[in-house]
Image: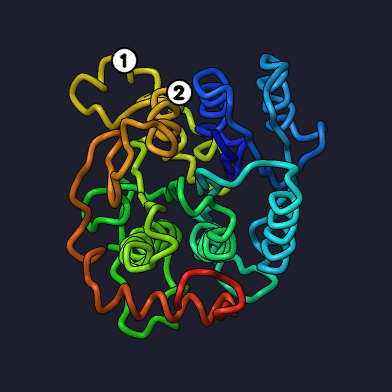
């Protein structure tokens, strides 16, 4: 089948997704990246336990810290080498699952000097994707799946206080309040997906690769809501809503649990059912994203700015820049 790469593979959504991938698509090779690959990390231990249920699976857990751009370059060089040497088949999917947020403790910055939400959620996956496009099979192609949320659309997210509106001066993108920073990162991801999709379709060698973005829904059992940075009021409310979820989902289907979203993201990434599909999905259905996300002028400006921030040039990717 080919290689499926999942970032943040020990996350709340990724754990059931890995289980579904290995059970439903046993011929795949799974490359699962985590920030801490030791068994001291309880979430990585859970990932290893899931893999142990599939003794014939071709899996590897690889350490990848998405914050420093240097680590992404080193990791992609490693993937280039392994595929070139025949140690694993070409890529069929990149699932950009990992994310971070900083809600109440103020902005945090990476060693490269970028605000952490933008750095991990957007710049890391932007760099990873552009550098790994050469590792897809030109004939078979594949898919790149980005993650967004309703927070990209002003007024839709329940916890929004300040709308995620992209500033004209993109150098101001990293400045803002906690949930706004997160929402902006999800808006930026969407806009980048649209620009990437257009460029892939124009490329003779890359047109078999599709770019998609998915809002997997409000994952009420996500451990992201248990972090010390999450306001106590939020955490209490989420616990209550999670307890009521079996009833609430009848009224609002997007209020779901991680296991519900796991099948959606794996099928969007590799299922023949979604062959030829592209752009924006809410859960497993094609949908319309916000008007701001479709601004092609800003999409192009953001693309160029992201190349600048990530220090990427034509030597880094087979996609014409």
Q: How many marks?
A: 2
Looking at the image, do the residues carrying marks 1 and 2 touch, with CB atoms under 8 Å apart? no
Q: Residue at x 57, y 22 (%)?
A: 26
Numbered tag placed on residue 259 in the rendering: 2
Spatial CA distance of label 1 from label 2 is 13 Å
- In the rendered view, how is the structure colored? rainbow
Q: Is residue 303 visible?
A: yes
Q: Residues within 10 Å of mark 2 (few under 14, many from 20)?
A: some
User: Residue 310: percent from the left, percent from the top?
Assistant: 57, 75
Mark earlier in primary sequence (1, 2): 1
Label 2's element? helix
Label 1's element? helix
User: Residue 40: percent from the left, percent from the top?
Assistant: 82, 33
User: Residue 98: percent from the left, percent from the top?
Assistant: 55, 47
Instruction: Give the image quarter of residue 274.
Output: top left
Q: Is residue 172 above or below residue 261?
A: below
Q: Residue furthest front?
A: 139
User: Closer to the camera, 228 or 108?
Assistant: 108
Q: Is residue 274 above or below residue 231?
A: above
Q: Residue at x 65, y 61 (%)?
A: 67
Q: As drawn, is 100 to the left or to the right of 244? A: right
User: Closer to the camera, 39 or 313?
Assistant: 313
Residue labelled with disc 1 = 246
Q: Residues within 10 Å of mark 1 (few under 14, many from 20)?
A: some
Numbered tag placed on residue 158 in the rendering: none
User: Closer to the camera, 157 or 15?
Assistant: 15
Quadrant location of the C terminus in the rendered image: bottom left
Q: As drawn, is 104 to the left or to the right of 149? A: right
Foreground label between 1 and 2:
2
């Amino acid at each position: 089948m080919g290689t499926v790469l999942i970032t943040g593979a020990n996350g709340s959504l990724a754990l059931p997704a890995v289980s579904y991938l290995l059970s439903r698509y046993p011929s795949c090779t799974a490359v699962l990246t985590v920030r801490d690959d030791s068994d001291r990390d309880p979430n990585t231990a859970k990932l290893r336990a899931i893999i142990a249920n599939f003794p014939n699976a071709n899996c590897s857990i690889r350490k990848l810290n998405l914050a420093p751009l240097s680590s992404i370059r080193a990791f992609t060089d490693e993937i280039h080498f392994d595929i070139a040497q025949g140690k694993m088949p070409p890529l069929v999917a990149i699932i950009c699952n990992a994310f971070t947020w900083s809600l109440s403790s103020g902005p945090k910055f990476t060693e490269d000097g970028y605000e952490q939400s933008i750095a991990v959620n957007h710049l890391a996956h932007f760099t990873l994707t552009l550098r790994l496009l050469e590792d897809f099979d030109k004939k078979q192609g594949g898919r790149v799946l980005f993650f967004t949320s309703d927070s990209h659309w002003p007024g839709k997210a329940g916890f929004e206080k300040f709308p995620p509106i992209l500033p004209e001066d993109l150098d101001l993108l990293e400045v803002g309040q906690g949930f706004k920073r997160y929402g902006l990162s999800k808006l930026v991801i969407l806009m980048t997906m649209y620009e990437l999709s257009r460029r892939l379709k124009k490329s003779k060698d890359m047109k078999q690769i599709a770019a998609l973005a998915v809002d997997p829904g409000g994952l009420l059992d996500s451990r992201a809501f248990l972090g010390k940075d999450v306001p106590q009021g939020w955490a209490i409310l989420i616990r209550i809503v999670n307890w009521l979820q079996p009833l609430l989902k009848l009224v609002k289907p997007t209020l779901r649990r991680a296991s519900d979203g796991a099948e959606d993201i794996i099928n969007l990434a590799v299922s023949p059912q979604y062959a030829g599909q592209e752009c924006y999905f809410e859960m497993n259905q094609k949908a319309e994203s916000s008007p701001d996300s479709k601004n092609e002028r800003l999409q192009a400006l953001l693309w160029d700015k992201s190349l600048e921030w990530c220090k990427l040039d034509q030597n880094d990717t087979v996609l014409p820049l």
